Image (cartoon, rainbow, N blue to C red):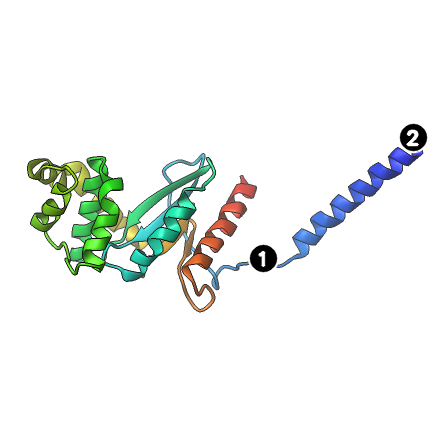
């Protein structure tokens, strides 16, 4: 009985010391160096989950190269993560591309056309800068011109584009690709985060931090 009590105390002491050791360790990634903490958190879609946004632009070569990495990462997310893509907008061409993104989403063809839009712009030198060029691309994936035009110019799609444009300031987005965790933290490559793979490691770090805070 005494032996069991000593064993229990030894285990408790070990766990206590281990917890103290973890707490004593400095954070692997720090605000202002590896990520930016927003001064005012942006409300997320689902407060019961940890939201992660991938901020991208179809015309961004870095975003194009990021796609295989982020898609592989997104395929292995836990159920408590609410992952979404978010099209960046700071000029008229980006606004057209955001409109294409939300059009594809509304027509339930985003999985079909997301990669081809990237390919057209980054590999085929087709800027997809107007409705006609985008309609031609969507037609290759089973979307009729009339259906495309109706969705592209619809009130819901234009509303989403306007909302995305308004959120750009709240997220303080100045480059792509970025990742935003739970409306609080913005991650981009910089002198401290040198690779896109490390970007995702910082995202995982912040997800764990948000999860432990819940």
Q: Residue at x 53, y 42 (%)?
A: 211
Q: Residue at x 65, y 57 (%)?
A: 25
In-image side of 65 versus 133 (left or right)? right
Determine which of the numbered discs, if any, sits on residue 123 in the image.
none
Residue 158 in view in this figure = yes
CA neighbours of label 2 inside 10 A, class few (<14), some (14 to 19), many (20+): few
51 w.r.t. 4: above or below = below
Q: Residue at x 40, y 44 (%)?
A: 74
206 w.r.t. 49: above or below = below
Determine which of the numbered discs, if any, sits on residue 1 in the image.
2
The picture quadrant where one finds residue 188 is bottom left
Q: Position of residue 76 (x, y in %)?
A: 45, 42
Front-lying residue, 4 or 123: 123
In-image side of 171 versus 205 (left or right)? left
What residue is shown with label 1? Answer: 27
Q: Position of residue 175 (x, y in %)?
A: 32, 61
In front: mark 1 or mark 2?
Answer: 2
Q: Position of residue 23 (x, y in %)?
A: 66, 52
In-image side of 186 versus 89 (left or right)? right
CA gap between label 1 and label 2 equals 41 Å
The picture quadrant where one finds residue 15 is top right
Please state, as top left, top right, bottom left or bottom right, where the N terminus lies in the image.
top right
Q: Residue at x 46, y 58 (%)?
A: 198
Q: Secondary structure at mark 2?
A: loop
């Amino acid at each position: 009985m005494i032996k069991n009590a000593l064993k229990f105390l030894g285990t408790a002491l070990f766990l206590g010391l281990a917890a103290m050791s973890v707490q004593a360790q400095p954070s692997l990634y720090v605000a202002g160096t590896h990520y930016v903490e927003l001064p005012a958190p942006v409300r997320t879609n689902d407060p019961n989950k940890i939201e992660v946004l991938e901020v991208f632009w179809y015309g961004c070569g870095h975003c194009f190269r990021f796609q295989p990495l982020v898609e592989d990462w997104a395929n292995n997310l836990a159920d408590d993560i609410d992952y979404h893509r978010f099209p960046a907008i700071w000029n008229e061409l980006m606004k057209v591309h955001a409109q294409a993104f939300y059009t594809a989403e509304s027509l339930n063809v985003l999985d079909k056309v997301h990669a081809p839009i990237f390919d057209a712009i980054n590999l085929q030198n087709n800027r997809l800068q107007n409705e006609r060029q985008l309609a031609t691309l969507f037609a290759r994936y089973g979307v009729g011109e009339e259906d495309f035009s109706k969705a592209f110019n619809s009130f819901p799609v234009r509303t989403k584009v306007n909302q995305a444009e308004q959120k750009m300031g709240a997220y303080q987005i100045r480059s792509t690709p970025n990742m935003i965790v739970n409306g609080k933290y913005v991650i981009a490559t910089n002198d401290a985060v040198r690779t896109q793979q490390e970007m995702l490691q910082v995202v995982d770090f912040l997800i764990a931090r948000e999860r432990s805070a819940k």
